[in-house]
């Protein structure tokens, strides 16, 4: 999505959503005395994929967020929290209507969402128009905290740039000179490969070939044969879900994993490792989380998450959990008075969170500053090898707030 | 590109085409002989893959999964034909599209309830799990070669049934001139049922065979459905031989398109389809008078 599309002058739809947003503000305006306003619960709109390909991710984010609220006795900053839930189905075409419904009819004070970048960018646009507080718990599109950044938009996950940039130096330092990159031909793929290539070439590496497959196709055999012919020192890749499983298995079945080590963005082996089995062994990736982080916050989080849901927590649950922690910091700073917006946003922007992923703070564009870990698949999980780069800060290119 | 790499890419193309043929042959049978547009064909392909996963998990044997999965699909096909599809012969294509689209939703929901949303892997039988060293760093899984052989055998079996058996004769008569055949005393009810069930079983068979080299995941049938329709239209509706030619052409175009013209590879097969249809509007082996 381009900046131009986002910052279009007023359209009819923008007018409508603007009106809806204005209605929200009247409803919660400072005309009430703060004491009365604080008695009513703060309404948090969860706009996540509860069905479809990303349903599991949406559920984990939701569980993580609610876990934090439960740990605080159902209150954030002393204010009761009420939830309203919308299934975005990962459908960008329905995103604007869904978001408008949350801020308009449902009168959500804060919206938390979502996984899919296309949906998230539509939410960002509505949030900009209506000044609704938005917390993005996953979608990594660079633009959300780049050209489309706004004071009322926060992200508790990552930017695509951030997740792969450190790998460029890691691989160059490992003595790798020539790399073939491979991904789906769409925005997330281009951003992740682009950030890696930026840092890799800066450190003296060379991209021999930039292979792409149309999204979401999973027929890789022709390109795997091409990789075998090109004989690079290593391959850097980004795929996710079913495509990630198939690519890793095809790569191993062709025997390439024995001679050309496979590297990737963290999502290559996150949530897919069980289906990949032996084929994933030894793959190195970068992400802002690893399965065996042993900081106290992570251990406590994993235990509590297991007790609540019966499942093993993952990065998506952490991103939801931290979303609630961020909102808590904002509301605590203003004593639960949501109308003291500027003060609240300033407190959130300055937040220092002891996250299960490690220390978490925010840059001026409201994107996380966090450690990116180098992980390797061992014993069927993504185990941390080292901190690939500490306190990675997205450059927030195009953001006017920086 | 050196000679060996060219050979490997050719092998990739043929192997891809072989699976496409298997899935598309079922579609073209149902479409050409019964005149039924079955949008749920891709859903049955997915169902086959999930059955392969589940039966292999339960019994530990991929061969059992292969036989069991095809049998289940065949029985499901018989039931569906008896209860629903029978009512749609000769009806508007819209009614068929609606029914089969409904089937997609139902099958997907059943998949959701029984197997969830996770991605699964299926192990090929141990005696096919090795690989052959082709170049200094590239090996080729034996299972992929086995798929080529298996698909070839399946193709021969289909041709044999259609060209040499009584049921094949009835099928051919029915697709040539149904009214005349009926006047001559041929009852189509049972044949229709078998043809539909065979079509479903072929889709499932494709899904089962692909499961070990692909992975099993929700939505895997969607892309396959579109490709199958392209193959059917390209080869000529109702022509199994056409499906074979069409599938091979798609395999070649897709594989070499990805290698030589990566930026436009996604549209190449549709360009191919457009060009072929301009040249032969009824498909390569379709009846041109139709």
Image (cartoon, rainbow, N blue to C red):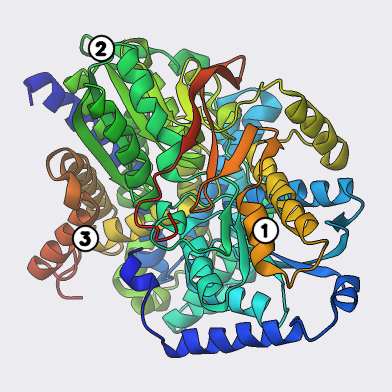
Label 2: which secondary element: loop
Q: Quadrant of residue A33?
A: bottom right
Identify residue for label 2: B137
Q: Position of residue A214 (x, y in %)?
A: 31, 49
Q: Are marks 2 and 1 on the same chain?
A: no
Give me the C-alpha separation between circle 3 and circle 1: 34 Å
Q: Which mark is residue A82?
A: none
> Viewer-nearest of labels 3 and 1?
1
Label 1: which secondary element: loop
Give me the C-alpha separation between circle 3 and circle 2: 34 Å
Contact check, label 3 and label 2, Cβ < 8 Å: no
Examine the rendered structure and indicate whether residue A118 appears above or below residue A317.
Answer: below
Residue for point 81% across, 30% down: A300
- The residue closer to the viewer here, A154 or A242, is A154
Residue for point 36% across, 10% down: A258
Q: Is residue A358 visible?
A: yes
Residue for point 35% across, 45% down: A191
Residue for point 21% across, 55% down: B269
Q: Position of residue B289 (x, y in %)?
A: 15, 75
Identify residue for label 3: B270
- The residue closer to the viewer here, A309 or B216, is A309
- The residue closer to the viewer here, B238 or B55, is B55
Q: Quadrant of residue B252?
A: top left
Q: Quadrant of the N terminus of chain B?
A: top left
Identify residue for label 1: A50
Pointer 2 local density, CA inside 10 Å: few below 14, some 14–19, many at least 20: some
Q: Chain of mark 3?
A: B
Examine the rendered structure and indicate whether residue B80 appears above or below residue B259.
Answer: below
Q: Are marks 3 and 2 on the same chain?
A: yes
Q: Chain of mark 2?
A: B
Q: Position of residue A286 (x, y in %)?
A: 47, 28
Pointer 3 local density, CA inside 10 Å: few below 14, some 14–19, many at least 20: some
């Amino acid at each position: 999505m381009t900046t131009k599309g986002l910052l279009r002058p007023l359209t009819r739809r923008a007018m409508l959503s603007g009106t809806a947003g204005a209605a929200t503000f009247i409803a919660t305006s400072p005309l009430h005395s703060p004491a009365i306003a604080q008695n009513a619960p703060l309404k948090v709109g969860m706009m996540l994929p509860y069905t479809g390909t990303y349903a599991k991710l949406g559920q984990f984010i939701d569980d993580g967020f609610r876990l934090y609220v439960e740990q605080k006795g159902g209150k954030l900053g002393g204010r009761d929290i009420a939830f309203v839930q919308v299934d975005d189905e990962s459908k960008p075409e329905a995103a604007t209507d869904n978001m408008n419904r949350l801020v308009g009819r449902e009168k959500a004070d804060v919206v938390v969402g979502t996984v899919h970048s296309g949906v998230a960018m539509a939410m960002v646009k509505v949030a900009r128009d209506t000044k609704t507080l938005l917390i993005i718990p996953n979608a990594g599109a660079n633009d959300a905290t780049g050209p489309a950044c706004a004071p009322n938009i926060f992200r508790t996950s990552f930017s695509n740039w951030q997740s792969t940039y450190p790998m460029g130096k890691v691989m160059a330092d490992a003595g790798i000179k020539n790399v073939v990159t491979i991904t789906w031909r769409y925005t997330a793929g281009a951003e992740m490969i682009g950030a890696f290539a930026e840092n890799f070439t800066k450190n003296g590496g060379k991209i021999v070939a930039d292979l792409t497959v149309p999204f979401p196709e999973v027929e890789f055999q022709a390109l795997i044969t091409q990789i075998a012919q090109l004989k690079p020192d290593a391959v850097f890749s980004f795929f996710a879900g079913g495509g990630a499983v198939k690519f890793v298995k095809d790569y191993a079945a062709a025997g390439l994993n024995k001679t050309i080590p496979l590297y990737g963005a963290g999502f290559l082996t996150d949530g897919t490792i069980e289906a990949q089995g032996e084929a994933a062994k030894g793959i190195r990736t970068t992400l802002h989380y690893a399965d065996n982080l042993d900081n106290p916050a992570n251990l406590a989080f994993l235990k509590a998450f297991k007790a609540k849901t019966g499942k093993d927590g993952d990065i998506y649950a952490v991103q939801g959990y931290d979303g609630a922690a961020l909102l808590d910091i904002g509301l605590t700073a203003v004593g639960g008075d949501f109308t003291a917006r500027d003060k609240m946003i300033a407190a959130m922007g300055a937040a220092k969170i002891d996250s299960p992923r490690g220390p978490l703070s925010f840059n001026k564009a409201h994107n996380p500053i966090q450690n990116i870990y180098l992980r390797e698949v061992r014993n069927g999980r993504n185990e941390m090898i080292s901190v690939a780069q500490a306190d990675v800060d997205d450059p927030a290119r195009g953001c006017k707030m920086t | 590109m050196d000679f060996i790499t060219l050979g490997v890419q050719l092998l990739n193309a043929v192997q891809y085409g072989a699976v496409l043929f298997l899935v598309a042959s079922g579609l073209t049978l149902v479409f050409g002989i019964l005149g039924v547009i079955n949008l749920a064909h891709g859903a049955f392909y997915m169902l086959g893959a999930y059955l392969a996963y589940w039966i292999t998990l339960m019994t530990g044997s991929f061969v059992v999964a292969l036989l069991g999965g095809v049998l289940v699909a065949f029985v499901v096909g018989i039931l569906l034909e008896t209860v629903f599809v029978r009512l749609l012969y000769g009806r508007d294509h819209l009614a068929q599209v609606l029914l089969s689209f409904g089937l997609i939703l139902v099958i997907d929901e059943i998949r959701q309830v029984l197997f969830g949303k996770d991605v699964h892997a299926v192990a090929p039988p141990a005696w096919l799990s090795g690989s052959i060293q082709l170049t200094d760093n590239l090996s080729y899984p034996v299972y992929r070669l086995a798929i080529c052989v298996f698909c070839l055998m399946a193709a021969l079996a289909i041709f044999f049934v259609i060209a040499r058996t009584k049921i094949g004769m009835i099928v051919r008569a029915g697709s040539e001139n149904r009214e005349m055949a009926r006047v001559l005393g041929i009852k189509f009810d049972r044949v229709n049922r078998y043809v539909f069930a065979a079509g479903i079983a072929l889709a499932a068979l494709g899904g089962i065979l692909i499961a070990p080299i692909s992975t099993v995941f929700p939505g895997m049938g969607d892309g396959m459905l579109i490709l199958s329709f392209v193959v059917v239209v390209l080869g000529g509706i109702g022509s199994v031989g056409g499906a074979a030619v069409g599938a091979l052409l798609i395999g070649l175009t897709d594989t070499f398109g990805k290698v030589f013209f990566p930026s436009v590879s996604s549209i190449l097969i549709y360009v191919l389809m457009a060009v072929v249809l301009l040249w032969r509007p009824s498909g390569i082996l379709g009846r041109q008078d139709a």
